Each structure stands twice: as structure tokens, then as C-alpha cells.
Image (cartoon, grey):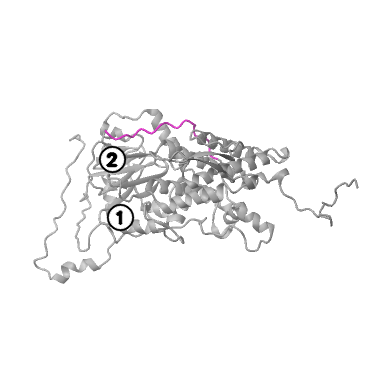
Amino acid sequence: MDPRISTPRPRGITKSNSTASAGARSTKSHESVSVVGPYPLGSLRVLRPEWSPRTTNYSALDQDDDMGPPSLEPSIEEVYHLSGSHEQHDSARQTSIAAPSSTRIRGSQSHSMGGGDVALIIDLPEVFTVGYDALSFTAQHFGGVRDVPEGPHFFWTTHSSGVATRAGVWLLGSQSHDRVHVVQWDKYNENLTEALTSEARNHAENVPNIHAKLIPYPDPSKVGGAVGQLPASRIEANIAIWAQLTTSITSSLLDRITGPQSGGWIVHTLDRAQGIAQFSAEVQLERLVPSKNLQQRPLKFTFERTTRMFSLESIGPERSLEAIDPTKYLLSQIEDPSNDLVYEDLVGELQFSFVVGLLLGNDACLDQWWFMVLKLLVKSHFLVEKQPMLAAALWRALTAQVTFGTKWLETTIMDPVEQRCRDLRISLIIYKRRMEEFLQGDENLISPSHLAVSTAFSRLESVLTELGWDLTTNYVRQGMLMLEDGEEVELELSELDAEEERGEWAPEIVELDEQGREFGLVSWD
């Protein structure tokens, strides 16, 4: 560690030993009191306006860490602008994308160093694993990141052992490029928490003194003026993939899912989806967490996994169609004025559940992502016809997620052995057939927006081809499978049997005569 980078840690007020002068009841009374915060009950801290009692030390990153994700081959594709069913949402949506809410702006801190926003995570342990957006590394005396660009960003932390839970926070980079975001590490509950107002103000005022020692956002290896180790192509790829992963993450979306929070939107590995019962594995994980004061936040998704996707007012074939194809359900939820939604929110929830689920290991978000992909996206065949711009945006979002999961992470979520991946492959084959049937229909009904869906789906198909997925119509129905012990068994797949009985091969109900012959046929008797 470069001694020029580190600064001595100032000592605060030493806590006195009051055991000798206090009774047994008073010294142990804190064990029965639930305390939530970064400091133990009864501690005393003195804050002076001219200096902060806690100044974080900074050092260069561990040079042995592998921080080299491959570059993103496809260039950034312009995201289609999605507007909701109500025109009054448009101006509010643009405001939420550009900047945080007014309450955060009034309470925020700023700096005058230029280059971009500054994100500070104070009170982290000396050696900790830190990640933001498409990067992660093990840092010593991590304090924060400078030159944070405009837009949504996700910071997370965990113990370097890699077996602990993770805590993360969503931050929105400002257009002015001068905001200071301050988040505090709660060492007693091992979670991120909102920094005290005085603490945030003191650290924001100290930014000019530590700005040069903060980690540069594009390349963490350039800390302290060191020569960067990431090539320009890799830096561009990291920025590009993150932009595609968060095209629809806004302050209003984060407020609705996590609840309004000041200073950032904090999430945790143990956060659970609202209204969803916990599985035994999730309960066991909670028991392993040592902190009893950790508050789990309920995540409120608009499209819940337990929601009925058909209307009780529908009867007969109409209800059956709604149960098979949730397009009507999706559009009704978005267009309902009481929900205060726009079409972009569907893409945003898909992106939120993927990022939080994958980077924090949050089971609730991972299950929500699989639900949206398997039950909503690939089943909404009529969405291509009714809202092609929304369908194209969803396929682009899924393409970016598959790319990130296969090229930026050590393990992929597209494991061909997993049942959900097999279900996804079959559903994609069916979706492709239905989409091609529609696009090859009446040319007068096809617009450039409909063709954009085919383009977005083709890009996803090319990414899946690299994983060995084949979405063509040539699908193996029957074959021999070799087991682990060398035994060969005959296997017959019936996933596409229902799909084969469509169109000209679809069964029909006919009327028969007394001899069991179909009415209307020509008889030569």
C-alpha cells in the first residue's frame, strides 16, 4: 500500500468503562432493547462543524484481483421511448429519469470538484468486497467513488470471504455532476444504512481534501494517480452493458418497489417480496444471519407471482385465452389509472429484479425475474400486435441480461440442466413461431414497430446461440439418452405436442350422421 495514499485515522472520544460505577441491571439492560443504527445504545459521539470524527482512509486496489470482463460486442442500441396510457405521466417520467425527487434534492450535498457525482460509503471494514454497476473488487480502506456519471447506479458490499449476505444501494447520478451521495455501513447489523445528516454534511465538505484519493468510476485501478489497468474497450463495454441493464430504472420505480428512502434506495439479500410466503431455504438463511436487529424490507412488485392473470368477469373461451396469454392482464394493469404506471415500468421491474437478484443473491428477486420471463414475457404473444414497442424493449432488456450473466459473471443463470431454462427454451421456440406467423400475415397491418420486435428477438437468439441454444423449428422429438452409468434409454419429448396441433393441423368439432360419418362429405353410395 502506498503510504502517500493512506491518511492517519483520527481518534474519537474514548468510551469510558462504567462497569465499576453502574449496577448489574444497567450494564446489561441494552440486551433487551431493540436498537437499529450504526452505534450501540448508550454511546456518545461529539460532532464539531469544522471536522468529521470519522475520516476514511484510502489505498490502491489489490492488484491481484481479476477485474477484466470481456467487451460487449454489440453496440448500444437506441432504446425506444415508451409512454404510458396517460399523457400526464410523460412529464413526470422525464423528471424522474433526469433527477431524484425534490425531497432528495433539498437534502442532498454537493461538491465543486467537477467530473461527476461522488458516492461515499463510510465506516466499511479495512478489507471488504465492493461492487458497483459492472465491476467488483476487494478493496482496502474503501471510501468511495468519484466521477460517477448521470443515471442509475447500484453499489453493493459484502465480506471478502464471499459467504456472507450482501447489502446494496441504488443511487441516481445527477445532471449537474456535483452531488455527494453518502451511505453508512452499520457494523452491528452488517447492513447499509442512511448516514446521519451531520455525518453526510461533514463528509461532503471534506470531499475536496480526499477527491484525488477516491476511486475513479471508469477504472478503479487508477486510484491515487496510478496507471489504469483496464483497456479503453473494456471500460466502454462496462459502461455500455450497464446502460442497457438499467434503461428503465427511475426514482418513481424505486420508490414504489422499496418504499421512499432518502439518500438512496437500500436493499439486502434477505429482503422479501410482499405477499409471498418464504420457503424453508429462505427461513434457514435468516437463522444463519447473526444480527437479530436486521430489518427486512418488503419489495412491492406490481406484477406479483400470486396474481390471477384473468378476469373473473370473463367466461368461456375468453377466460381460457386470458389464462394462456397474459397480454390483456399486463395492459390492464398498466392502463389502470389507480396504479399510476407507464409501460416503461414493466421493463423497469424486470431490470430491478435481475440486478438485485443476481448481484445480491436475493432469492425473492430471482424468483420474480423468472416469473416475469416465463409467465409474462414469453407467454404474451399478442403483445407483439398490441404494443410492439413494449415487446421490443422487453426483449432488448432480456438480451442485455443474458449477455451480462454469461460474459460478466463467473456462473451463468442459463444453465441448460435447470428445469426453468428448459422451459424457457421451449417457450422461446413457440414465441418465435407465433411472432413469425403474425409478421408473415397481412402486410397492411405490419408497421416498422412490429418489425422492431423481430429485430430485438433475433439479437437475443444470436446471444443464446453462443450458449448452444437452437430456437429453430427443427426440434428433436425422440432419441436415445445415455445415463451416468452408461445405460441408454429411449426418450420422447412432448413439450411441443400442443403447438403442433395449431393452424391447419388444429382439431375441429364436426357433426356426424347416424352411420358415424361427417356431414357435408360427398357420398358415392
Furthest-left residue in this view: 20
Rate crowding at label 2 as few (under 14), some (14 to 19) or many (20 or more) other CA atoms within 10 Å: many
Q: Is residue 501 left or right of residue 242?
A: right
Is residue 393 or residue 115 the one in the foreground? 393
Q: Is residue 302 left or right of residue 202?
A: right
Furthest-right residue in this view: 525
Which residue position is annotated with label 2?
138
Dot 1: element: helix
Q: Amino acid at mark 2?
A: Thr
Kindly identify the residue that appears in the image at 48 percent across and 49 percent down.
369
Dot 2: element: strand
Rate crowding at label 1 as few (under 14), some (14 to 19) or many (20 or more) other CA atoms within 10 Å: few
Which residue position is annotated with label 1?
197
Is residue 270 or residue 23 the one in the foreground? 270
What residue span does the magenta drawing correspond to? 64-79
Q: Earlier in the sequence, mark 1 or mark 2?
A: 2
Kindly identify the residue that appears in the image at 32 percent across and 50 percent down.
183
Q: Is residue 327 left or right of residue 239?
A: right
Q: Answer whether residue 437 is magenta in the image.
A: no
Image location (x, y in percent) of residue 178 = 36, 42
Q: Amino acid at mark 1?
A: Thr
Kindly identify the residue that appears in the image at 39 percent across and 59 percent down.
280
Q: Quadrant of the N terminus?
A: top left
Q: Quadrant of residue 270?
A: bottom left
Q: Quadrant of residue 147?
A: top left
Principal secondary structure, stretch drawn in magenta = loop
Image location (x, y in percent) of residue 13 = 15, 55
Image location (x, y in percent) of residue 261 = 39, 56
Marks 1/2: CA–CA distance: 28 Å
